[in-house]
Image: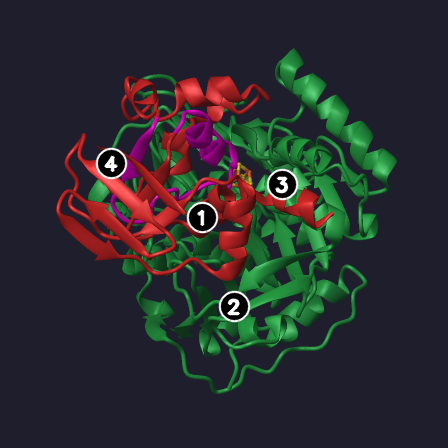
Chain colours: A green, B red
């Protein structure tokens, strides 16, 4: 039987296909180069502006006049061309596309590597570069090589403070940074049913850290209910019994809080083995862990206490921020001494709003800890939200719930 | 298509942040990317890669989708990149910019002469010739046109 990628792309693994895309998006970073490449094409056409999205999230609000000029030009272009446009403060592109836009069975391309996040909805969602995107703007379609698929079977349920992020870091470490190159990851098994959409997005978000083209979950009752809350009515996708190129079994009961040690995402250690590592900054947010569920978890741990290290919280979208304000958890996060920055990527890419200095150590809930990413000479440890919260309170790496 | 250059050796898992750091992305000036290529790995590298064939370890170009990484190497004058595997977005970006890539696991010595022959499907390093998997016909077409933009313009 065909895998979900094969079903959506309509051809067996290994084949090259040309396909129209259902949604195509860029952000303020990659949009600039896309616009340049599109102009170089010289055709002047935008095939389907109604399928194109331009979402400002990377450096928002603009930090320098160069950034402001580039954003000014792209904003004017997007609006003029009739594309969907989201300005500063609305949120991270992958999160916004995940708030009722991406639907099961769609082909989605984004000019950002973490487009794979949207595989959580049972869509075939993958990242492309700026020149590819320019041709997609002009023609409405692109080519794909249908990927082979690695099946990741999840059983049981997560326990205690273990989160989808710990599960994600665990599968990345088991596959390695190129263990799934050119492949798709499919998350299947009864364990998936216990994961919320927020958690599934975290799971699929890290697929690209194994080199994968995308990570997918079949749309089920959880997906249907989530999309219904955004007014979208969809059908579940039945997972077939298919043979995967490679299979990986993960028992969710065995997942424990882990940390990816700099500078590799695939080098993990249990949090307990790093307890006491001094920190200069804690960052909670990003397309990996800036959602509702994440802020709720964070607030439940810091509620009524004070953080002992500078702590930056960036909600993934305006909706997440509004929900946090409505339910009162925003006030709790602020009272704990955290700095809340506008919805968007925040300091994740080391451009502004929390760049770290030489020799500084940051514990972040993001997906990458490459050398110098958040600032030259700084080091990044990656963890779940609960670990970040416990560590913020301790001022050093600490196990959520305390040492056993 | 036949290319040649002197080998520059790099390790495995070179990510796009290392190829061009995030702090240089807010510009459209390609010469800046070329001058800052590999800065965080070795600041002297950018000056040495013109006319070279990079021979790297596996998973070259992993990480962010930033096309500036491929642009930087193309602008800096890299002739071809050879690695056992490439991150897929980097792979697409490079081909789209007309920067050829070849898949092979080769022992590397800085300065050795490397000849890549895409028509014959071989890489020759010193005395040794190794087979490389062929690129898809579409990719060869794009490379022959000098990149996706030119390919599109020709198609019209
Ligand atoms: S939050 Fe970080 S990883 Fe996610 S899109 Fe923004 S910069 Fe990229």
Disc 2 + disc 3, Cβ < 8 Å: no
Alpha carbon separation for disc pair 2 and 3: 25 Å
Residue B150 numbered tag: 3
Alpha carbon separation for disc pair 3 and 4: 30 Å
Is residue B66 shown in magenta? yes
Q: Name the residue at 80% across, 45% down.
A: A46
- Chain to which mark 3 belongs: B
The residue beneath circle 2 is A146
Q: Residues within 10 Å of mark 3 (few under 14, many from 20)?
A: some
Ranked by sequence position, the earlier of labels 4 and 1 is: 4
**Stretch of the chain drawn in magenta:** B51-77
Work out whether residue A182 or residue A160 is closer to the camera in this orientation and state it.
Answer: A182
**Above or below, A362 relative to A201:** above
Is residue A65 shown in magenta? no
Disc 4 + disc 1, Cβ < 8 Å: no
**Above or below, B118 relative to A304:** below
**Above or below, B74 relative to A357:** below
Using the rendered image of the protein, determine whether residue A328 is visible from the camera's viewpoint.
no
The residue beneath circle 1 is B91
Q: Quadrant of residue A212?
A: bottom left
Q: Name the residue at 50% across, 60% down.
A: B137
The residue beneath circle 4 is B10
- Mark 3, ligand 1, within 8 Å: the answer is no
Work out whether residue A8 or residue A118 is closer to the camera in this orientation and state it.
Answer: A8
Return the residue found at the far top.
Answer: A65
Q: Are marks 4 and 1 on the same chain?
A: yes
Ranked by sequence position, the earlier of labels 3 and 4 is: 4
């Amino acid at each position: 039987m065909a895998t979900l990628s094969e079903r959506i792309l309509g051809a067996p693994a290994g084949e090259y296909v040309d396909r129209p895309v259902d949604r195509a998006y860029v952000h303020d970073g990659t949009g600039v180069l896309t616009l340049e490449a599109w102009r170089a094409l010289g055709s002047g056409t935008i095939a389907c502006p109604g399928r194109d999205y331009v979402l400002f999230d990377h450096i928002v609000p603009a930090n320098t006049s160069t950034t402001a000029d580039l954003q000014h030009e792209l904003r004017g272009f997007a609006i003029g061309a009739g594309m969907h446009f989201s300005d500063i403060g609305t949120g991270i592109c992958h999160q916004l596309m995940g708030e009722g836009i991406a639907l099961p069975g769609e082909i989605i391309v984004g000019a950002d590597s973490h487009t794979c996040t949207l595989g959580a909805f049972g869509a075939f969602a993958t990242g492309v570069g700026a020149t590819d995107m320019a041709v997609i703007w002009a023609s409405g379609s692109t080519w794909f090589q249908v990927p082979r698929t690695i099946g990741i079977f999840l059983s049981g349920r997560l326990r205690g403070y273990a989160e989808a992020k710990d599960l994600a870091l665990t599968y990345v470490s088991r596959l390695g940074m190129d263990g799934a190159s050119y492949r798709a990851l499919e998350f299947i098994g009864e364990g998936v049913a216990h994961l919320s959409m927020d958690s599934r997005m975290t799971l699929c978000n890290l697929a690209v850290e194994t080199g994968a083209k995308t990570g997918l979950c079949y749309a089920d009752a959880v997906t249907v209910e989530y999309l219904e809350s955004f007014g979208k009515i969809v059908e579940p996708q039945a997972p077939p019994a298919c043979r995967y190129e490679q299979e990986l079994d993960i028992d969710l009961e065995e997942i424990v809080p882990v940390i990816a040690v700099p500078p590799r995402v695939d080098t993990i250690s249990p949090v307990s083995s790093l307890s006491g590592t001094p920190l200069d900054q804690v960052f909670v947010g990003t397309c990996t862990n800036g959602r509702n569920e994440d802020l709720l978890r964070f607030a439940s741990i810091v509620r009524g206490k004070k953080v002992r290290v500078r702590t930056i919280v960036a909600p993934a979208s305006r909706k997440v921020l509004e929900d946090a304000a409505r339910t009162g958890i925003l006030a709790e996060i602020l009272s704990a001494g955290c700095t809340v920055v506008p919805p968007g990527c925040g300091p994740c890419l080391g451009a502004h709003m929390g760049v770290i200095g030489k020799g500084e150590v940051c514990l972040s809930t993001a997906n990458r800890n490459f050398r110098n990413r958040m600032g030259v000479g700084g080091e990044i440890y990656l963890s779940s939200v609960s670990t970040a919260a416990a560590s913020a309170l301790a001022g050093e790496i600490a196990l959520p719930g305390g040492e056993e | 298509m036949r290319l040649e250059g002197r080998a520059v050796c790099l390790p495995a898992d070179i990510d796009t942040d290392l190829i061009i750091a995030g702090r240089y992305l807010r510009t459209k000036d390609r010469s800046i990317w070329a001058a800052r290529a590999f800065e965080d790995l070795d600041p002297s590298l950018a000056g040495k890669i013109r006319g070279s064939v990079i021979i790297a370890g596996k998973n070259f170009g992993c990480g962010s989708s930033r096309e500036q990484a491929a642009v930087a190497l193309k602008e800096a004058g890299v002739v071809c990149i050879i690695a056992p595997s490439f991150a897929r977005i980097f792979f697409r970006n490079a081909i789209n910019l007309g920067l050829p890539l070849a898949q092979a696991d080769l022992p590397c010595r800085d300065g050795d002469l490397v000849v890549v022959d895409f028509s014959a499907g071989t890489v020759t390093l010193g005395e040794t010739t190794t087979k490389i998997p062929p690129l898809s016909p579409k990719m060869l077409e794009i490379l022959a046109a000098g990149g996706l933009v030119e390919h599109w313009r020709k198609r019209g």
